[in-house]
Amino acid sequence: MRLAWQAGPQGLDADYTVFLHLLDSDGQIAQQFDAPPAGGWYPTHFWRPGEIVLDEHDLAPSPMLPLGAYRLIAGLYRADGTRLLLDDGADFVQLAEVEVVP
């Protein structure tokens, strides 16, 4: 999956990790993928204000996932677990709705 991140007007003051969560119908994490953006080669504290950074992640959903509907969300968090907030105050963006079928 290719993501495109854009640094805000002040840039970023810390290094963040990308999270991709597959949420079940109750909003619980069914599977997660966490990794530094850009494979760790370009930490977020180097991102210039307004810069767009392309970020690739290999997602391999577990074959053990129960059948049903899921939401794929993404965001960034610091080492202390604090998520980066978007302009609207949310701490993630929904990327897709996924249906696991037989």
Image (tube, rainbow, N blue to C red):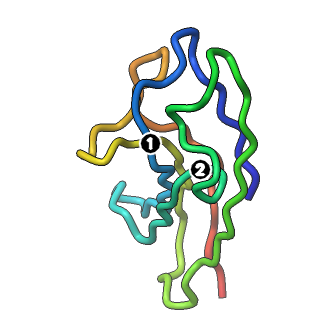
- In which quarter of the view is residue 53 placed? top right
- Place of residue 67 in the rendered image (x, y in percent of width and height, measured from the top left): 53, 80
Task: Identify residue type, mark 2.
Answer: Pro
Describe residue 70's horizontal placement relative to residue 85 as left or right.
right
- Residue drawn where x is 57% and y is 32% of the image: 46
Look at 60% across and 23% down and name the residue there. Answer: 7
Measured in 3D between alpha carbons, the distance from the residue under mark 2 to the one under mark 1, in whole angstroms, is: 8 Å
Quarter of image, res 63: bottom right
Amino acid tagged 1:
Tyr
- In this rendered view, identify the residue nearer to me: 50 or 2: 50
Q: Which residue is mark 1?
A: 16
Q: Which residue is mark 2?
A: 37
Residue 83 lies, in percent from the top left, at: 35, 37
Q: Foreground residue, 23 or 50?
A: 50
What residue is at 65 percent from the left and 34 percent from the top? 5
Q: Earlier in the sequence, mark 2 or mark 1?
A: 1
Q: Is residue 56 left or right of residue 15?
A: right
